[in-house]
Amino acid sequence: MNKIIKIALIGKTNSGKSTLINNIVGEKISIINKKINTTQESLIGIKNYKNIQIIIYDTPGINFLKVSKTFNKNLKVNLWSSIDEADILIYMIDILRFNYKNIIQDIKKISEVKKPILLLFNKIDLIDKNEILSKIDLLKDIKNITSFLSISAKKNIGIKKFIKFISSKSYHSKWIYQNNEISNKDDIYITNECTRNAILKFLHKEIPYNIKIKNTLFKYLKNNDLKIKQSIKLDNKRYKPIILGKNGNTIKRIRECSQKDIKSIINNNIHLYLQIDTKNAK
């Protein structure tokens, strides 16, 4: 009989949530970027392990919880909807940025839903094992933390143990997704995300987080190459010269970076065309 378990990955920006979900699923479905809140929507990754379907909610970084901006309200909705859906909350910590006070505050906040919390230390390849144990000692008496595990998402250390542990918490249920599905998002969404990631990567000083990428063409050619056209929709015209760059160099780098990432995911030759849309911009 099939079983299921739903988990929500929660943590600060750069704790490694997107790297972990990509590692577990085996494909790059969640963008990885050092900028704050690159994960804006609640993306679901699916891992079918033996007779168990593991459903993983990749949530926005919780750095924004105390901020009351309209943009951040959307992130809060995505975070809490994922928490509501999950059976287990995985609070992920970059062990190199361990902050006891912040952890206590975050755990207290997410404990309001009264669900088991697994505290997951990431990047353990960069720290001495004794330091990990000392940090666990600091946190072991906190209510609602039911388990501790350590991994390196980037180096693939402890991932099998993590999957086995999560699987042990599964329960009998029909699978929600098909056997060959790895995400609730389609190829168009993921290719759009590749371009959004490339924009975040190359715009260091002023990052227009509220830009939207819209697909206008997604077509396989007779030779099996994939032709993609995307529109970069702006709500402010002053972003246009920033994205274009001097002599169009920035948008060229964005296109080349995105095209390379898409090719690595879809395993086809990609012809990517980008257009900047300021039609409804201020």
Image (cartoon, rainbow, N blue to C red):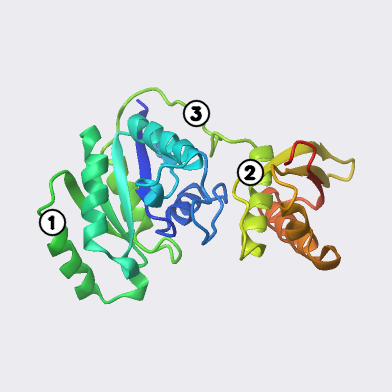
Give neighbour class at mark 1: few <14, some 14-19, many 20+ (Cα, 10 Å).
some
Q: Amino acid at mark 1?
A: Lys
- Kindly report which numbered mark, 1 or 3, lies closer to the viewer in this rendering: 1
Give the residue at mark 3.
177
Give residue 89's position: percent from left, percent from top.
Answer: 30, 42
Would you say the residues marked 1 and 3 are in contact, meaning their CB atoms lie under 8 Å apart?
Answer: no
Which residue is at 27% across, 41% downward? Answer: 110
**Quarter assignment of residue 86:** top left
Q: Foreground residue, 210 or 228?
A: 210
- Kindly report which numbered mark, 3 or 2, lies closer to the viewer in this rendering: 2
Which residue is at 72% across, 53% downward? Answer: 239
Give the residue at mark 1.
140
Q: Foreground residue, 104 or 96?
A: 104
Give the residue at mark 2.
190
Q: Earlier in the sequence, mark 3 or mark 2?
A: 3
Give residue 164's position: percent from left, percent from top.
Answer: 31, 48
Disc 3/disc 2 C-alpha distance (Å)? 18 Å
Q: Amino acid at mark 2?
A: Ile
- Left or right placement of residue 262 versus residue 62 in this view: right
Q: Earlier in the sequence, mark 1 or mark 3?
A: 1
Disc 1/disc 2 C-alpha distance (Å)? 38 Å
Give residue 124's position: percent from left, percent from top.
Answer: 33, 68
Asked whether residue 53 is in view, the answer is no
Q: From the viewer's perspective, is residue 20 above or below residue 70? A: below
Q: Amino acid at mark 3?
A: Tyr
Q: Image quadrant for the N terminus?
A: top left
- Left or right placement of residue 143 versus residue 193 in this view: left
- Left or right placement of residue 262 versus residue 22 in this view: right
